[in-house]
Amino acid sequence: MEMIPDRLPPARERGAPAWLRRNLFHGPVNSVVSLLVGFVLLSAVSSLVRWTLTGAAWAPIWSNMKLLAVYRYPADLLWRPVVALGVILLLLGLGAGLSKRAGKGVIVGGVFWWFTGATFVITALAIAFWPSVRLPWAIASGMALAGYGAGLRVPALVRIQAWSWAVGLPVVLILLYGLGGEGPMEVVRTTEWGGFLLTLVLAGVGIAVSFPLGILLALGRRSDLPAIKWFCIGVIELVRGAPLITWLFIASLMVPLLLDVSPDSIPALARALVAITLFSSAYMAENVRGGLQSVPSGQGEAARALGLSGWQTTRLIVLPQALRAVIPAIVGQAIGLFKDTSLVFIVGLFDFFEIGRKVIPSQPDSLQYAGGVLLEVSLFMAAVYWFFSYRMSMASRQLEKELGVGER
Amino acid sequence: MRNAEAPERIPFWRNVKTIGILAQVVFAALVLIGIAILWTNVTSALSRSNLPADFGFLDSRAGIPIAERPIPYSPDDPYWRALVIGVLNTLKVSLVGVVLASVLGVGIGVSRLSANWLLRQIATWYVEILRNTPLAVQIIFWYTAVLATLPPTITAPLRLPGGVYLSNRGLAFPFAYPGFGFRAWLPWLIAALVAYVVVMAVQRRRIARADRPGRAWPWAVAAAVALAGVGYYAASFASDPPETLAVDLNVERGRGITFRDLDADGSRDRDEPAVGFVPVTVRVEEGVLEARSQNLVEQRRVKPSTLRFPILEEGEYASAELRFVNEADAERYEVHWIDEPTTGRLYVDRNGNGAWDAGEEVGEDGVGFRNVRTQLVVTGFERRVVSDRDGQVRIPGFEPVDAAEEEAAAGGAGFGPASLFTAPGGADGDDEAAGPALETSTVIGSSGPLVWSTPTVPVSNYAGGFSFTPSYLALLLALVIYTSSFIAEIVRGGIQAVPKGQTEAAKALGLSSGQTFGLIVFPQAVRIILPPMISQYLNLTKNSSLGPLAAYGEIFAISTIVANQTGASVPVTLLIIVSYLAISFAFAFVLNIVNARMAIVER
């Protein structure tokens, strides 16, 4: 038997040429695809960049920033929504700092810094261009940093974290709506709200209210009592059967009829929230049901064997495990809801989307441009929506990995 | 340990069963009370506001113009018919959308796993960008920003190969319609269908008896196609136009109708039915088309001093010559043809080089030359047009040369030279009927059972062929692209979920990478992909309710109009919910059958 002489291991290819060969020019087909796609991409990107820098009309968007942000919110009270944002960043920063301290803060921290970074950019813009909101934005940036610093320094704050949200969210709403009377805390009616502020309020309230409702519906759907079970199934499937835009339309028509009051006495925001919450709850219920089904039945049985009551079993054993498993799905739903708030034009609200679609293009200044400015506006809106959705969906995917969902 | 002999009786108020029943009774009572309160509220509110609360309004005249109508419809039709059109439009956009989104989504999903780094990155960013942007923004992007402005207006559409037009009026392409010869072909088609079924059955039995692998369908399809082909050939002999078929065409208005001329007087009377899909060859010996110069906005640019005549394709005319109505204009302006003889641009030859140079199409003040009247004298115009479903025929509206000259003289009153154009013996311009007639002829062509209809652009919209409105295109495009980003993720996940050993085993058996994917990996991935895909299909269908953003008349858009017109909020609400539940249910039903057939059979 003849021995094959020893040979050196094949040289490991390194460096840019090897990377190119491996990833772009691996065989003739691959090379052609690379060149073709590269050419198309390059020409598309270059013409887009040229148009963005020279051809596009960005002036109408720049001059309408206040409209896009808050619509008709009184100009001298603009500090209130900005400080409200600061409160939210403070709470987020607290969470980010605390989890960083605990050594697992990649996800919360990532989201926090993404949004805080945007706040810093706006603060810089405000300092340069918008003197009336300079101070509020600086305060908001400061609050974000303060929250993060406090979380990082004082780990004991972890005990009041849940309570801080419970206090913080009403504070945010009070800041936005006001307390009454004249002066700094005078009431700003919801008909004056709009723009991105309204988009965030709709998405935030929608998710916050639909979360408990969805859990109730999901528990009801898994109930042993047929009356409750079938009621919940009926509600969930009915609501999920028709699209959100139809529920918004139905709410705007039916809510005054159902309450037998004149249509003017119910603000459009309330009607939109009814539809959004109802819709979101049904989807939330299905997400939570998925989580409930993923909890092994042995968990519940063991809890009952230990003498826990049915309610205790659900609250202490089953729900925590179920919700933990569906956090990514819930984040996904929050993103969906955030995008879907663009449909509230149907009830006559002027959210971010409606201002970009209707208000800005019909201004006399915008009509000066041949062909209108909707192309620029729609690209700008897409970029803003994308900025928020993308970071959240990234977080959802990281969470999925961390929780090991899908690996079981 | 429980004492088996004397079980302790549980008091009924602690019995789980009793509590359960009680809880349900209380719950049901609460729900019923709630419904009752809401019901009385609604009825009292309705009676107070005097709004319709039943479905009686469905039979009254709708008066809603709908651009997109798969079945015949006019604004005089009742509400229920408008709503039916809405449902059909919803189905039309969602069924086509589902197919296209699947194809695109699978392509993108596979690209995300490509070995090519560039392709992989592009696919990833495609998904990340489109998934995280609201569909509403994407719809207005495609509709308002791209489709409504990018392709030029109707008289200068993009001409794609194969007679396809794309413009801001939508996409039009040639299409075959059943003509008057179709009836002769029908028996053959039925025979072909029977042949398919019979041959299929026979072949299946033969294969089963031979117990060898084989395919039944090639023979069946061949038999059916052969029979249908022979039938088509035979039927095309028997499909001369019927004697009574006639066309009533007003060349000056550019419109006419094909109909059954029962009393043979050449014009359509009330009781004479219109006949659709009739090929007509129109010939105009000499006629005049009119146009005024305009400053058009196209592709987001102002195009000053533009002349637009109806499109005349190569070979449709013998000669086309431009002239100015006013003599003064003829001396001042020149014409620079962009697309002779359809699109041109007026200019003043300031530097005298005899050709158009940039800047010469506007005056010294930078404003284009508007409202300059011009005429295109066309000789030997001949076009084959096919009437639409309702028998309507459209051609460019020609004016007689002489009358046009008469008018030119009137228009240029006060100028001496204009009188030179007055035709000798020209009629007075007041009475058009008495004026010189156009020398035209119309011939109804023979055709096979199917009439090949190519799109034309008579004036401002397509005629003939098959066309999609820009609304439909924009909504379809947005739905397909948005949904494909979700489908791509499902496909990627499904392919990655196939165990790696499957690929390795296939490679070890000597299959190529294409075979490995097509025969081993993808069939297994499909079973994982299908259930989430079904929910995406349902999402696409429900998302088509964003049609109003693209002015597309689907069920939600039409329902809102109906509700606003009639005030019948409760009935319309019920109709919307029932329509969507029915569509969702039908979709889910069909797709779940498919899924059940494809699913892994658990052993």
Image (tube, coloured by chain):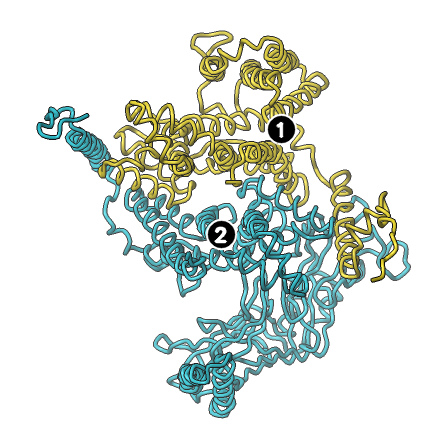
Chain colours: A yellow, B cyan
Q: Position of residue B443 (x, y in %)?
A: 54, 84
Q: Distance between the residues labelled 1 and 2?
A: 41 Å
Q: Residue furthest front?
A: A1
Report whether residue B84 is seen: yes
Crowd around label 2: few <14 · some 14–19 · many ≥20 (10 Å): many
**In the foreground, B150 or A244:** A244
Question: Could you tell me the amino acid type at mark 1?
Answer: Asn
Instruction: Judge left or right: residue A282 versus residue B477.
Output: left
Dot 1 falls on a residue whose secondary structure is loop
Q: Residue at x 77, y 54 (%)?
A: A34
Q: Where is residue B541 in the image (x, y as percent from the top left)?
A: 45, 51
Dot 2 falls on a residue whose secondary structure is helix
**Image quarter (top left, top right, bottom left or bottom right) of the C terminus of chain B:** bottom left
Instruction: Judge left or right: residue B575 versus residue B395.
Output: left
Residue hosting label 2: B533
**In the foreground, A234 or B435:** A234
Question: Could you tell me the amino acid type at mark 2?
Answer: Met
Q: Nearer the viewer, mark 1 or mark 2?
A: 2
Residue hosting label 1: A64
Give me the chain letter of mark 1. Answer: A
Instruction: Judge left or right: residue A183 versus residue B359.
Output: left
Instruction: Judge left or right: residue B568 versus residue B345.
Output: left
**Image quarter (top left, top right, bottom left or bottom right) of the N terminus of chain B:** top left
- The number of discs equals 2
Relative to residue A304, is residue B254 depicted above or below? below
Q: Position of residue B426 (x, y in %)?
A: 63, 75
Co-location on one chain, circles 1 and 2:
no
In which quarter of the view is residue B186 placed? bottom left
Crowd around label 1: few <14 · some 14–19 · many ≥20 (10 Å): some
Q: Which residue is drawn at 75% across and 42% down?
A: A55
Q: Which residue lies furthest to the left in this view?
A: B6
